[in-house]
Image (cartoon, helix red, strand yellow):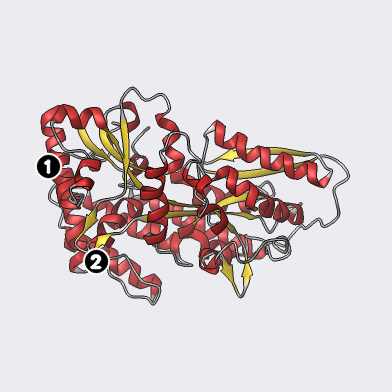
């Protein structure tokens, strides 16, 4: 896995202009809806950020089962867009005539995509749903004016994956041992990280997907910031990223990188899954990468801070392109791919938003690489207490502009408070 270097100001501005242009053009284009049943084979493109062949095969099985139920032939094309480029590249494709018919949507970008008109209304396609099985809370982010525009297929918390061998070699207590002592805190996370690095010469921690300084900076910082009692911004427009709680949390991480030197730094490609870091942040969908691991590994919830444990939930939805030539069929396929049986089949990879699946014993045993205890403590319990990242209709602009300030953090002598004041100013400009 390759670490992504922090985005430069020039590239960030290009991304901002591209995303703004794409959304603007989406407003001006008319739909090309085909409502009749296709008489011949239909080609549908589905955009995702996964390239895992097993996951793609599972998704394609839903497409083919759906086609069989409709008595038609569907030729599916799965387009895998790298996560760090996803929003920008997808938005460009959606304003062209060759954009995907269905696509995954990140929770942070949900309001922007809904507002742009790029997502088709799914109310008609969802008529067969049991409304009590998906909570209104789960659909709130993906709705506007009482209508639903995308359906969440994954409500997946982030947790710690760790290399048991490296902890043993370092003579350090591993996360599960600290949990048993009631001592799994961010302060102790920092202490054992330094111990592991000092005693083994190997990085103790790699940020989520190696992108914690760039595309996943909020995923990286949110668990620490929120467990310290801070946040980025609130739904009612309060900007909190430069408050004392958030500053203390970000300072802790910054010190781990530049004082303790226990964290894989920006630009370094050392990877947990290759045995070159003792811990990383992951989700159930990442566990498959450990199938052939050369080391014993464990899984634990995120550490706690002064205000307790604050897991981040990565919620992803799937929607239909409102300008698709087969928009009605695409909307029906979205509903099929998120029905009860499909969600149950995906549960071991992408924890569902459906209550009937989440509350089942089958869910706790749905991933053969994860024990039922791990699934309950690190996944099911975290879903109940965790929160998604903040979102906003102007999130694309917020993300790009704030990243130019966040990039300044990744220097040894960075003034954390001053930089977070800059980030706060960006947030305030767009949110209030």
392 or 22: nearer the viewer: 392
Q: Quadrant of residue 5?
A: top left
Q: Let me know if residue 157 appears in the view.
A: no
Q: Mark 2 or mark 1: which comes first in sequence?
A: 2
Q: Quadrant of residue 280?
A: top left
- On screen, residue 267 above or below 113: above
* Disc 1, SS: loop
Q: Work out which residue is located at the far front of the displayed protein and give it.
A: 361
Q: Callout 1 environment at 10 Å: few (<14), some (14 to 19), or many (20+)?
A: some
Q: Which circle marks residue 125 in the picture?
A: none
Left or right: where 331 falls relative to 229: right
Q: Position of residue 222 (x, y in %)?
A: 31, 57
- On screen, residue 390 above or below 334: below
Q: Let me know if residue 236 appears in the view.
A: yes
375 or 351: nearer the viewer: 375
Left or right: where 200 falls relative to 32: left
Q: Work out which residue is located at the far right of the displayed protein and give it.
A: 39
Q: How far is disc 2 from disc 1 in space, using C-alphas?
A: 24 Å
Q: Quadrant of residue 259?
A: top left
Q: Which residue is mark 2?
A: 229
Tell me which residue sits at (39%, 52%) in the image: 12
Q: Quadrant of the C terminus?
A: bottom left
Tell me which residue sits at (51%, 55%) in the image: 359
Q: Which residue is mark 1?
A: 260
Left or right: where 170 falls relative to 322: left
Q: Position of residue 49 (x, y in %)?
A: 51, 43
């Amino acid at each position: 896995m390759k670490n992504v270097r922090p985005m430069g100001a020039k590239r960030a501005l290009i991304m901002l202009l591209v995303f703004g242009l794409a959304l603007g053009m989406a407003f001006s284009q008319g739909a090309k809806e085909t409502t009749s049943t296709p008489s011949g084979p239909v080609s549908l493109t589905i955009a995702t950020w996964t390239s895992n062949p097993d996951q793609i095969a599972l998704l394609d099985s839903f497409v083919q089962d759906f086609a069989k139920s409709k008595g038609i032939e569907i030729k599916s094309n799965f387009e895998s867009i790298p996560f760090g480029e996803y929003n920008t590249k997808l938005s460009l494709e959606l304003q062209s005539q060759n954009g995907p018919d269905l696509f995954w949507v990140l929770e942070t970008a949900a309001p922007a995509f809904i507002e742009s008109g790029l997502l088709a209304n799914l109310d008609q396609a969802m008529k067969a749903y049991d409304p009590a099985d998906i909570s209104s809370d789960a659909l709130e982010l993906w709705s506007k004016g009482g209508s639903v525009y995308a359906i969440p297929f994954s409500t997946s918390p982030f947790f710690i994956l760790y290399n048991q061998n490296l902890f043993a070699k370092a003579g350090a207590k591993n996360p599960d041992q600290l949990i048993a002592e009631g001592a799994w805190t961010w302060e102790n996370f920092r202490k054992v990280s330094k111990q592991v690095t000092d005693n083994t010469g190997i990085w103790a921690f790699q940020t989520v997907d190696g992108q914690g300084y760039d595309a996943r900076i909020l995923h990286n910082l949110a668990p620490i910031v929120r467990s310290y009692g801070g946040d980025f911004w609130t739904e009612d427009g309060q900007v909190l990223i430069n408050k004392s709680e958030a500053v203390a949390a970000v300072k802790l991480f910054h010190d781990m990188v530049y004082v303790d030197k226990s964290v894989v730094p920006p630009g370094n490609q050392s990877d947990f899954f290759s045995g070159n870091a003792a811990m990383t942040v992951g989700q159930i969908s990442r566990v498959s990468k450990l199938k052939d691991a050369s080391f014993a590994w464990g899984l634990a919830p995120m550490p706690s801070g002064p205000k307790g444990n604050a897991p981040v939930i990565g919620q992803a939805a799937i929607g239909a392109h409102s300008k698709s030539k087969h928009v009605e069929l695409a909307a029906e396929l979205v509903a099929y791919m998120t029905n009860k049986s499909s969600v149950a089949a995906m549960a071991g990879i992408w924890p569902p938003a459906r209550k009937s699946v989440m509350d089942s014993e089958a869910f706790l045993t749905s991933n053969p690489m994860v024990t039922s205890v791990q699934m309950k403590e690190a996944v099911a319990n975290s879903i109940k207490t965790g929160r998604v990242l903040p979102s906003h209709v102007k999130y694309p602009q917020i993300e790009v502009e704030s990243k130019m300030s966040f990039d300044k953090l990744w220097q040894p002598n960075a003034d954390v408070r001053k930089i977070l004041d800059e980030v706060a100013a960006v947030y305030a400009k767009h949110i209030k």
